[in-house]
Image: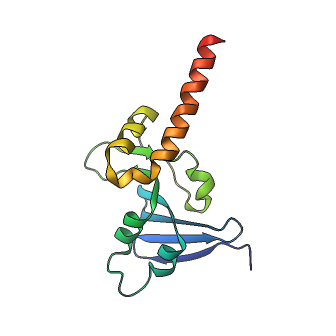
Amino acid sequence: MSDKLIFKKGWGWKVCFDPKRNLYTAKTGDGPSIDLYEINKEVFDHVDDPDIEYPTLYIHENGRHLFMAVDDRCGPPYTVILDSDYEELCPWANATTRGKTWDEDMTDAVVEIFESEKDNRDQRRKKRAERLKKAKESDNG
């Protein structure tokens, strides 16, 4: 099998399979407003099926949200980084932050509250524990 990235794309979405890492990722939106996701093989395989009426919704409902940059003219632009490894997971997406980036505590709270972000809870809790441990060590050092 080749080490080249494999892409599928449609209106408002693009998915990628990285055979070297056995990793499936997706990008929805374009321009100043985008979302990045980690997806599974099933989503990659079926996102372009004719029976999938709204591929972007299919990705959103079945993927783990990694990153969101919003610049929709309804307010000031902002960015939410749900997984700080988004650039490593989706280097092909060329994601850039917009406006103010939510701080870690705000993002942690959103992940805990919203059911749609439940796939990020374990990862966010682990990262938060690491941040708290480092802060405590620097206070004692």
Q: Position of residue 20 (x, y in %)?
A: 72, 68
User: Looking at the image, which is closer to me, 72 or 86?
Assistant: 86
* Quarter assignment of residue 59: bottom left
Q: Residue at x 43, y 65 (%)?
A: 28
Residue furthest toward the bottom?
50
Q: Residue at x 68, y 64 (%)?
A: 21
Residue 101 in sight here:
no
Residue 104 in sight here:
yes
Q: Position of residue 36 (x, y in %)?
A: 48, 58
Quadrant where the N terminus is found in the figure: bottom right
Q: Residue at x 54, y 39 (%)?
A: 126
State whether residue 95 is above or below residue 79: below
Task: Report whether 111 appears left or right of 96.
Answer: left
Q: Position of residue 133 (x, y in %)?
A: 58, 25
Residue furthest toward the left?
74
Quadrant where the C terminus is found in the figure: top right
Q: Position of residue 56 (x, y in %)?
A: 38, 69
